[in-house]
Amino acid sequence: MPTLPLYRDDFYLSTAEAYVSAVHDDGAIELDQTCFYAASGGQPGDTGFLERADGSRIMLGETRHGADKSIILHHPLELFHSDMLKNPTADQSAPVVGEKLVLHVDWPRRYRLMRMHTACHLLSVVCPFPITGAAVGEEESRVDFDMSETIDKDAVTAELMRLVNENHPISVTWITDAELAANPGIVKSKNVRPPMGLGRVSLVCIGENSAVDSQPCGGTHVSETQEVGAIHIAKIEKKGKENRRFRIRFGVPE
């Protein structure tokens, strides 16, 4: 059965209740709904834990999609009981179909990824070139652009921080898959397409009336640019004649 992705409508939802809909042979758990973001578009999947009725925890590694984007798989790291240290033989059985669980996202990690992902959007505003690749990380992200121009990283940092400090609102609107297909030019990435096949696609809009930016994206983002905090371009690398890799990090330049 398809998993209802609660995070698509609320990026700040860090806990929710759900029922187990399937347990795979490798231990992966499907739920009827989830607030765990599944890895996609360069953003890692969420980690955290699933809490059972007896208080025990199923610790999760990265959350991923299944055979298609409608399925979300929660991959356990281990099953942890609060009394495990006292009783190493405590039952660690897998959950069963129909079991009710409480979902807990590792919020500090998710929030850093939200801030970083938003920073990548701001970078695409400062550097309006086609994107050839991207990866969002907790400490550092990278965005690759199809460009040959020489550009000063300190100047880019200054423009990024200008957008951050102006504290533009960030919102999400929705368009249909058909509307996106009819307007392919709104996609900045050359190699990664926004998630389609679920009937609707989210547009991440920055600024009043999308004055700063608007682009399709299925990732999670903060609600205003000021939440991104201090960021800077640590390095610009030449990756071919017409490709430049920008590395974004939190904090101020050293």
Image (cartoon, rainbow, N blue to C red):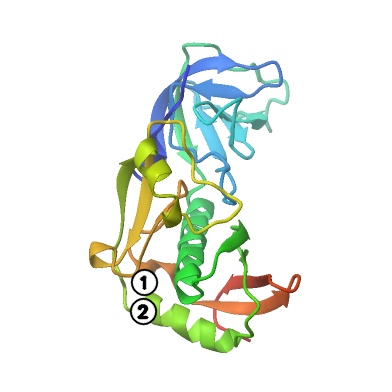
Residue 65: quarter of image? top right
For numbered disc 1, what is the local secondary structure?
Answer: helix
Rendered residue at 55%/64% (across/down): 130
Q: Can residue 81 be seen in the rendering of this structure?
A: yes
In the image, 38 versus 218, the foreground residue is: 218
In the image, 128 versus 89, the foreground residue is: 128
Tell me, for residue 226, which label it has, or none.
1
Considering every residue shown, the one lying at the far top of the view is 97
Q: Quadrant of the C terminus?
A: bottom right
The residue type indicated by label 2 comes to Asn
Rendered residue at 75%/70% (across/down): 239
Q: How many marks?
A: 2
Circle 1/circle 2 CB separation < 8 Å: yes
Q: Position of residue 109 (x, y in %)?
A: 54, 53
Residue 134 vertical placement versus 57 (above, below): below
Tell me how far mark 1 sits from mark 2, CA to CA: 6 Å
Residue at mark 2: 165
Tell me, for residue 108, which label it has, or none.
none
Rendered residue at 55%/82% (across/down): 252
In the image, 11 versus 96, the foreground residue is: 11
Q: Circle 1: is it few (<14), some (14-19), or many (20+) Cα within 10 Å?
A: some
Q: Position of residue 150 (x, y in %)?
A: 64, 85
Q: Position of residue 57 (x, y in %)?
A: 56, 30
Left or right relative to 144: residue 193? left
Rendered residue at 58%/37% (across/down): 63
